[in-house]
Image: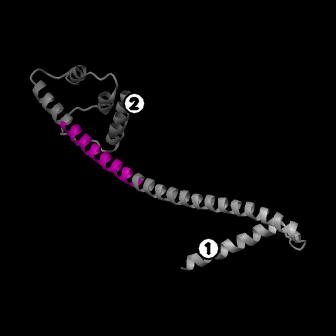
Amino acid sequence: MPGLLERQKHLNVASFYAVNRPVMQSGDEIANSGDAVLMSDNFSPSEYIRDRLKGVRTGDETKKLQALRSEMNAINHASQDMLKHNVFQNYQQFIDASKEISHLEQEIYQLSSLLLDQKQLIENLMQMTGDDKSSVQTASSHSASVASITPIQVLMQKMDGIAVNLLYSNFL
């Protein structure tokens, strides 16, 4: 949206000049609303010059035009300084945002890795419980003493075994 971008530039320039007005030479008759005219959407340079030269005596036009030129140069330099400052500030914000994005990417990668490990652990437990159910059913048909063991107890025993194996592997 070029119109929106242009208005934002005008607002930035206006706020800058509200605080940092360029120093004008004595004898200049600069209106305080001059900056607002320069930033309006329907700004016309020829009308601006004509308005600035109203009431100037014949022969003083050259002096007035030179004063206006020096004023425009001062505004130009102040705008350049403000633009440099804003570019640097935006660059710093870009660097900070890039660092934060990199940090978040690392955290997402770690979370993804943890979720994958959890998924594999759950799949392994599900396979083990399926194997245990068939072994419990086979054992219960062969022995009455094994029939008292529930599938939950078998699962708990397997989980204890996995926890011991994980602890042992972490110490290596």
* Residue 169 lies in the magenta stretch: no
Question: How did the renderer colour the structure?
Answer: one colour
Report x, y in % for residue 124.
66, 62
Q: Which of the two labelled residues, at mark 1 and mark 2, occupies the earlier sequence position?
A: 2
Under mark 1, the amino acid is Leu
Q: In the current view of this chain or complex, which residue is farthest to the right? A: 144
Give the Cα distance between marks 1 and 2: 60 Å
Return the residue nearer the eye: 46 or 28.
46
Is residue 88 found left or right of 154 in the rendered image? left
Question: Which residue is rendered at x = 37% and y = 31% of the image?
Answer: 7
Please name the amino acid that badge 2 sits on: Leu
At a point 59% along the width and 58% down the height, the residue shown is: 115
Q: Position of residue 113 (x, y in %)?
A: 54, 60
Per the rendered image, the range of residues in magenta is 73-96
Q: What secondary structure is marked by label 1? A: helix
Q: Residues within 10 Å of mark 1 (few under 14, many from 20)?
A: few
Q: Quadrant of the N terminus?
A: top left
Taking depth in this image into account, of 39 and 22 the one nearest to the observer is: 39
> Which residue corresponds to mark 2?
4
- In the rendering, which numbered label is found on residue 166? 1
Residue 41: assigned label:
none
